[in-house]
């Protein structure tokens, strides 16, 4: 399986503008710029997209790990915080809240650790990955 996205940029790094389009067209000429990346401008940015990718990948992997252990989540919710420092992504922090009937805290924490280490986006990132997990 191969997926793709395309970035187009016009102008200088600071004053220019760009747009992103994904294969699925969920993003279709979605604006990004210096301001949307480093200030509060309109549009998206690579770090926000990396956070979305990690949150989505981790959450789906956690669902598979839970299923393999005999559990089905009523709901999994993950927020991912990507930190950009001195031109490098230095960490990805996952904040997970879950409703999983019948699971113990120990089983849940082990499942979170498994998903954290083994989702494909975690494996892609060369950075510190941490998670805070709450079982509701």
Image: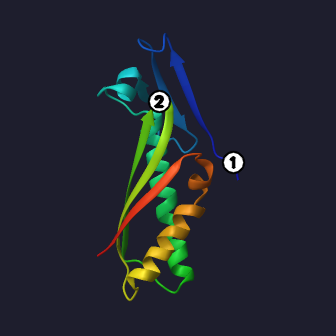
Q: Would residue 127 be visible to someone looking at this image?
A: yes
> Of the residues under marks 2 and 1, which one precedes in the sequence?
1
Residue at the spot x=57%, y=62% of the render? 117
Q: Nearer the viewer, residue 24 or 47?
A: 47
- Helix, strand or loop at label 2? It is loop
Image position of 86 with respect to 129: above or below: above
Farthest residue toward the right? 1
> Residue 121: x, y in percent?
57, 52
> Residue 48: x, y in percent?
42, 40
Q: For mark 1, does the 10 Å Cα neighbourhood hold few (<14), some (14 to 19), or many (20 or more) residues?
A: few
Judging from the image, the colouring scheme is rainbow
| Marker disc for residue 29 | 2
The quadrant of the image that shows the C terminus is bottom left
Task: Tell whether 18 sits left or right of 79.
Answer: right
Image position of 83 with respect to 128: above or below: above
Write down the quadrant of residue 36 in the picture: top left
Q: Would residue 72 be visible to someone looking at this image?
A: no
Q: Identify the residue under disc 1.
A: 2
Residue at the spot x=42%, y=52% of the render? 93
- Helix, strand or loop at label 1? It is loop
Q: Nearer the viewer, residue 109 or 102?
A: 109
State the CA–CA distance, disc 2 to disc 1.
Answer: 20 Å
Dots 2, 1 in contact, CB < 8 A: no
> Residue 11: x, y in percent?
49, 10
Q: Nearer the viewer, residue 107 or 48?
A: 107
Residue at the spot x=54%, y=73% of the render? 64
Task: Tell whether 50 sits left or right of 101.
Answer: right
Q: Nearer the viewer, residue 29 or 43?
A: 43
The nearer-to-camera label among 2 and 1 is 1
């Amino acid at each position: 399986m191969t997926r793709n996205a395309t970035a187009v940029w016009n102008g200088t790094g600071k004053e220019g503008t760009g747009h992103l389009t994904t294969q699925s067209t969920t993003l279709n000429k979605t604006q990004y710029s210096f301001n949307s990346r480093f200030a509060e401008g309109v549009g998206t940015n690579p770090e926000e997209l990396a956070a979305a990718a990690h949150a989505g990948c981790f959450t789906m992997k956690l669902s598979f790990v839970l299923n393999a252990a005999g559990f089905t989540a009523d709901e999994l919710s993950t927020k991912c915080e990507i930190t950009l420092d001195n031109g490098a992504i230095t960490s990805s922090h996952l904040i997970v809240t879950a409703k999983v009937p019948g699971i113990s805290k120990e089983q849940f924490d082990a499942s979170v650790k498994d998903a954290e280490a083994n989702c494909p986006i975690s494996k892609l990132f060369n950075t510190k990955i941490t998670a805070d997990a709450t079982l509701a």
